[in-house]
Amino acid sequence: MVRVVASSVRGPAHALDGVPCQDAWLAVPDSRASLAVVCDGMGSRSRSREGARAATLAARDAWRLWKRSPAGSAEDLVRLLEPAWRLRLRDVPRDEAATTCIVYAEDDHGRAVYAQLGDGLLARRNAHGDVKTHPSKTDGFDLTHALGTPHTLADWSLAIAAPLAQGEILVLATDGVSEDLEPRRLGDLARWAVDELGPLRRPGVALARELRNWPVPHHRDDKTLLVMWKP
């Protein structure tokens, strides 16, 4: 059994301007092969909300094909995801739908892939409490790569890993959350989501309330947090 708690909420800046949340997430928790995706539409692009939603669905499209074969690489998953995103957009201009994309994908053959384009957080807490964060690739100077902006396969941060084991917790977050987190507290955040939110009848609603009442002063950005674990 695999469990998930996740939510996206609109940031105060977007609420003030009447702009909808431009983050999106998708999860497929499955004991054989799970998927988790978090995307952050770029605020400077007029159709980024659609771009983020399309990216989560494109990741699922790519994963469904990719996970069938034991020979699929991390690069293969991304090569499937990018055209799937363009097809999901239909007639929406790609440059107006730019979005970051973070993916955790398991196959049916005992492997998992981390794939990240742009900023945000992908971290994993093992059963002993140790946390490892997957490194992202950015250009610096507050620039980030994204679907819909010029980039290459090399701009994706990719890695092969083992699937989630019992007692492990996966954390994915957009930068509205990740930029305010202290790295040493990541393990506590993961454990809090599992212990405090997991038993609730509507954990996603409770998480959304916590994200709206974010304790960092002057926070403005949309926020998405996805926590997946194997009890």
Image (tube, helix red, strand yellow):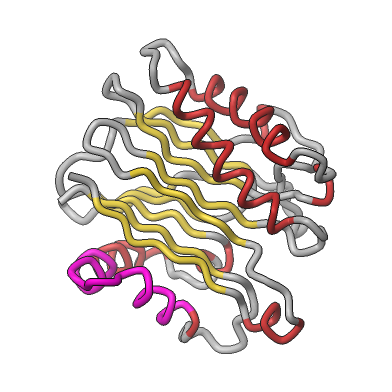
Please give the name of the residue rendered at 40% of the width and 28% of the height, measured from the top-left corner: 160
How many numbered markers are drawn? 0
Left or right placement of residue 155 versus residue 184 in this view = right
| Vertical arrangement, residue 82 with respect to residue 219, above or below | above
Q: Residue furthest top?
A: 71
Question: Which image quadrant: the N terminus?
Answer: top left
Left or right placement of residue 170 versus residue 49 in this view = left
Please give the name of the residue rendered at 71% of the width and 45% of the height, measured from the top-left corner: 145
Q: Is residue 202 magenta?
A: yes
Counting from the top left corner in percent of width and height, residue 185 is at 35, 68
Please give the name of the residue rendered at 49% of the width and 36% of the height, measured from the top-left corner: 60
Counting from the top left corner in percent of width and height, residue 137 is at 62, 43
| Vertical arrangement, residue 156 with respect to residue 97, above or below | above
Counting from the top left corner in percent of width and height, residue 94 is at 80, 42
Q: Residue furthest front?
A: 90
Q: Quadrant of residue 171?
A: bottom left
| Vertical arrangement, residue 17 with respect to residue 105, above or below | below
Q: Is residue 155 magenta?
A: no
What secondary structure do most residues of the magenta stretch adopt?
helix
Q: Nearer the viewer, residue 127 or 98?
A: 98
Task: State which region is magenta.
Answer: 192-211
Please give the name of the residue rendered at 64% of the width and 49% of the height, measured from the top-left corner: 100
Left or right placement of residue 23 versus residue 231 in this view = right
Counting from the top left corner in percent of width and height, residue 33 is at 30, 32
Left or right placement of residue 128 versus residue 181 in this view = left
Q: Quadrant of residue 4?
A: bottom left
Q: Nearer the viewer, residue 30 or 132?
A: 30
